[in-house]
Image (cartoon, rainbow, N blue to C red):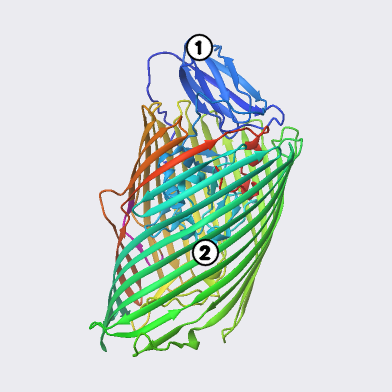
């Protein structure tokens, strides 16, 4: 699968072609300009061929050999470049082209450059969501389904190459809300607000070491200077969303306001069949049915202010507020039988999760005269109030109410971080760079929980507190980090990246009850090495070695027992230790002048101290699930992604992934190994009169865990879009999984104490209609905005969720 070097051509003709190449750079800073639009036309302005510059500012395309060919290069904030093409021996090498920045109102661009949906850029694989019409409705979870190497389970769990431990960034910076409850937070980010998804499997040392599988950076649409904004309204049977954005600029000041609100409903019906074992002999049997409906609703407000001191300095401040809650109603029918007899009941449960999250950030950026020389300072402060409560009522089979239990669980947390990053060029051209920096973060959380219940009394009787299940936990985590990163680029297109990051972690917890306090200190030195060789204009090779950390979070450590289902208990483990992950990866990228792109990779991932969720079942048939450091896991796999453009109207991206995983727990004397594969497709066709059709889908053969696996998982989606009002407005119709009311998935789990089979129906058939409108004027900023904001790890300026 790796190093596929065959040539694929589309729309071949017998006429002669010429090769046109060049490189684009800023006339003042000499820095390369990526993603600029390059168009070849004839004198009658008919478009012959088009492409975008890559991350190094280079472009390469082929065009029919005709007279009167003209090259046009456009990029926001710069003067348009035009030049007559004069080929020599079938080639036109334009060398380095310098663009000068400009100010003023942007005139309408005749040819709209559109980024390819999948792009390879340095150590990132980028899914340009803004180029995908299917992202006009839905949430960030739906967008992630289409990104390379990312899979989303029916429950909404995000995994990168089969690993759920991922560092999620929002516009290059960590988000406390995404870290706390990724599944629910993603539902509140509209798909229409997302610019791109950056997948980084081999992060450099400048990134935080957290995230065993790698880093996913969700970038929202960039702010444009001027007065204007956008509105997106979406309505459907499972979700409704509204997103409004307003930008205002006057002189050196710019202000951005973003408001969002939404609701989403999800229903799951589950049947559980579990046998309790003792020395391999059945001692009990549980059958259980659960019908659960969750409604997620909430809103977001964000305000960002930016002041440009001069052309090389800017300072920005942002404040954002999230309010999300996800009430869940469920009905459980339970029957357990053993040698003592039969226990049966019906249970109704109301669970409610809620978070109020506020975040403040302040950023300063200074660019110097030397290419790539830069200083960045970032500070963040956030607070969160959270609730996770449940109320259950149990009835016997005759309908008599005999038990009620409530468990209020509240928590409050605050987080502070400060980060400094500096880049020092080691030569005049900026090819050799020394990157250095540090980060300090401090987190404090308090969690208070208890349980009240009664038994054999009417539902309205007084509830009595159970002191044995009540406690209060105070938790802290301090991390101090420093890194050094060296980048070297040779004249023969070799690039080397060598980095190291040291992180000191101090964490601990205190309890109100008799449970002892705990304190842990960890010192981790992780390394990152990458060698990149550009063989020629179309072939690129990369070899990397990366080490990453997975630290236990507060919900992994908190011993609070969630007993909303008394037959299936879950709780944290305060004795968890961090895990160290190591990965070796080889990547090949092929880009043809026709626009065909192929990215393929092979990797080996190893972890000897893996944190895995372990389930045990006692003699009464009650299961307990908690995370433990009990296993090692290894993965050997590969990925392949390609972008195809059959003609000017039809584009398609295809992706495939395969790996084999080995789990082994010496402590429990159990293991599991299996293969995983997934495929995805995303195809769009542009029709006349501004109509566009799209089909996308994904399929996998099921996830693998230490104790079992799941069966297949697939989704498919159709979208149609009509644009009007000079493409400033549009309506999108989306249909997800139209041919099935619910998706069926089975999972199995095996251990010395039990065997279980679970059958789940996910009611995911949905439709939505989305109206989008952009209004106001658009002005350039007069400087290289892209260069000022382009991502450099977690040091990119924090941008609000803007358009």
* Residue sticking out furthest to the top: 67
Q: Earlier in the sequence, mark 2 or mark 1?
A: 1
Judged from the image, the secondary structure of the residue bearing numbered disc 1 is: loop
Query: Disc 2 to disc 1, how far (Cα)?
Result: 64 Å
Residue named by callout 2: 608
* Residue sticking out furthest to the left: 398
Is residue 43 in sight in this rendering? yes
Figure quadrant of residue 87: top right
Placement of 311 over or under 149, stated as above or below: above
Counting other residues with Cα less than 10 Å from the Cα at mark 2, is it few (<14), some (14-19), or many (20 or more)?
A: some
Q: Nearer the viewer, residue 119 or 751?
A: 119
Is residue 147 in sight in this rendering? no
Placement of 51 over or under 611, stated as above or below: above
Which quarter of the figure is the N terminus placed in? top left
Provide residue 206's location: percent of width, then percent of height.
65, 51
Which quarter of the figure is the C terminus placed in? top right
Provide residue 147's location: percent of width, then percent of height.
45, 46
Q: Specify start and end residues of the magenta stretch as a single range.
A: 706-714
Q: Nearer the viewer, residue 172 or 507?
A: 172
The structure residue drawn at horizontal position 58% and vertical position 60%, both measured from the top left corner, is: 176
Provide residue 298's location: percent of width, then percent of height.
48, 59
The structure residue drawn at horizontal position 40% and vertical position 63%, both measured from the top left corner, is: 705
The structure residue drawn at horizontal position 28% and vertical position 48%, both measured from the top left corner, is: 738
Counting other residues with Cα less than 10 Å from the Cα at mark 1, is it few (<14), some (14-19), or many (20 or more)?
A: few
Q: Is residue 744 left or right of residue 544?
A: left
Picture disc at residue 43: 1
Q: Is residue 426 left or right of residue 525?
A: right
Q: Nearer the viewer, residue 65 or 321?
A: 321
- Indicate whether residue 786 is drawn in magenta: no
Q: Is residue 788 left or right of residue 280?
A: right
Camera-side mark, 2 or 1: 1
Provide residue 377's location: percent of width, then percent of height.
72, 51
């Amino acid at each position: 699968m790796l190093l596929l070097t065959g040539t694929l051509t589309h729309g071949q003709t017998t006429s002669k072609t010429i090769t046109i190449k060049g490189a684009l750079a800023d006339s003042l800073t000499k820095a390369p300009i990526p993603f600029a639009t390059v168009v070849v036309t004839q004198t009658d302005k008919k478009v012959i061929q088009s492409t975008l510059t890559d991350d190094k500012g280079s472009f390469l395309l082929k065009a029919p050999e005709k007279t009167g060919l003209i090259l046009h290069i456009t990029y926001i904030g710069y003067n348009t470049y035009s030049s007559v093409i004069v080929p020599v021996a079938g080639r036109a090498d334009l060398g380095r082209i310098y663009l000068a920045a400009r100010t003023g109102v942007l005139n309408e661009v005749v040819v709209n450059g559109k980024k390819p949906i999948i792009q390879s850029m340095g150590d990132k694989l980028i899914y340009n969501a803004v180029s995908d019409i299917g992202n006009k409705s839905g949430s960030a979870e739906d967008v992630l389904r289409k990104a390379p190497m990312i899979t989303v389970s029916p429950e909404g769990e995000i995994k990168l190459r089969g690993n759920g431990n991922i560092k999620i960034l929002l516009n290059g910076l960590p988000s406390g809300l995404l870290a706390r409850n990724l599944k629910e937070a993603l539902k509140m980010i509209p798909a229409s607000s997302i610019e791109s998804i950056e997948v980084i499997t081999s992060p450099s040392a400048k990134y935080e070491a957290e995230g065993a599988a790698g880093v996913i950076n969700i970038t929202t649409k960039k702010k444009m200077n001027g007065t204007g904004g956008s509105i997106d309204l979406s309505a459907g049977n499972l979700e409704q969303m509204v997103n409004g954005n307003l930008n205002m600029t006057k002189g050196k000041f710019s202000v951005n306001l973003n408001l969002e609100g939404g609701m989403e409903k999800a229903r799951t019906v589950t049947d559980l069949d579990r046998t309790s074992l003792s020395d391999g002999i059945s001692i009990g049997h549980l059958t259980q049915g659960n019908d659960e409906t969750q409604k997620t609703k909430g809103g977001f407000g964000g305000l960002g202010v930016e002041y440009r001191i001069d052309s090389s300095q800017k300072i920005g401040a942002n404040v954002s507020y999230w309010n999300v809650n996800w009430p869940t109603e469920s009905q459980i029918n339970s029957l357990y039988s053993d040698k003592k007899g039969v226990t049966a009941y019906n249970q109704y449960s109301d669970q409610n999760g809620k978070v109020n999250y506020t975040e403040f950030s302040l950023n300063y950026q200074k660019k110097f005269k030397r290419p790539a020389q830069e200083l960045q300072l970032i500070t963040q402060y956030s607070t969160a109030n959270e609730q996770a409560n449940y109320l259950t009522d149990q009835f016997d089979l005759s309908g008599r109410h005999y038990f009620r239990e409530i468990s209020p669980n509240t928590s409050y947390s605050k987080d502070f971080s400060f980060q400094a990053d500096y880049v020092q060029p080691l030569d005049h051209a900026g090819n050799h760079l020394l990157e250095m920096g540090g980060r300090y973060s401090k987190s404090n959380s308090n969690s208070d929980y208890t349980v009240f219940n009664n038994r054999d009394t009417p539902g309205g009787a007084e509830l009595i507190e159970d002191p044995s299940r009540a406690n209060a936990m105070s938790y802290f985590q301090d991390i101090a980090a420093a890194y050094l990163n060296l980048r070297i680029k040779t004249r023969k297109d070799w690039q080397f990246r060598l980095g190291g990051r040291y992180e000191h972690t101090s964490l601990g917890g205190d309890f109100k009850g008799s449970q002892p306090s705990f304190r842990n200190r960890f010192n981790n030195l992780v390394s990152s090495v990458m060698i990149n060789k550009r063989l020629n204009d179309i072939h690129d090779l990369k070899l990397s070695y990366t080490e990453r950390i997975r630290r236990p979070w507060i919900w992994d450590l908190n011993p609070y027992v969630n007993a909303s289902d008394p037959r299936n208990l879950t709780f944290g483990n305060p004795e968890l230790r961090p895990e160290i992950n190591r990965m070796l990866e080889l990547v090949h990228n092929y880009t043809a002048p026709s626009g065909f792109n192929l990215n393929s990779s092979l990797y080996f991932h190893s972890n000897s101290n893996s944190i895995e969720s372990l389930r045990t079942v006692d003699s009464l048939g009650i299961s307990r699930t908690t995370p433990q450091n009990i296993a090692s896991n290894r993965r050997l796999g590969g990925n392949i992604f390609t972008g195809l453009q059959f003609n000017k109207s039809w584009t398609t991206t295809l992706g495939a992934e395969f790996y084999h995983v080995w789990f082994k727990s010496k402590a429990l004397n159990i293991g599991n190994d299996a293969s995983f594969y997934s495929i995805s497709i995303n195809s769009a066709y542009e029709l006349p009169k501004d109509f566009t059709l799209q089909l996308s889908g994904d399929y996998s053969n099921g996830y693998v865990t230490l104790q079992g696996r799941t069966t297949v998982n697939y989704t498919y989606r159709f979208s149609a879009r009509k644009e009007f009002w000079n493409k400033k407005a549009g309506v999108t119709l989306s249909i997800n999984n139209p041919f099935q009311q619910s998706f069926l998935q089975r999972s199995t789990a095996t251990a010395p104490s039990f065997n279980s089979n679970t059958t789940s129906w996910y009611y995911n058939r949905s439709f939505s209609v989305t109206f989008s409108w952009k209004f106001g004027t658009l002005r350039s900023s007069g400087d290289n905005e892209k260069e000022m904001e382009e991502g450099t790890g977690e040091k990119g300026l924090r941008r609000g969720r803007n358009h």
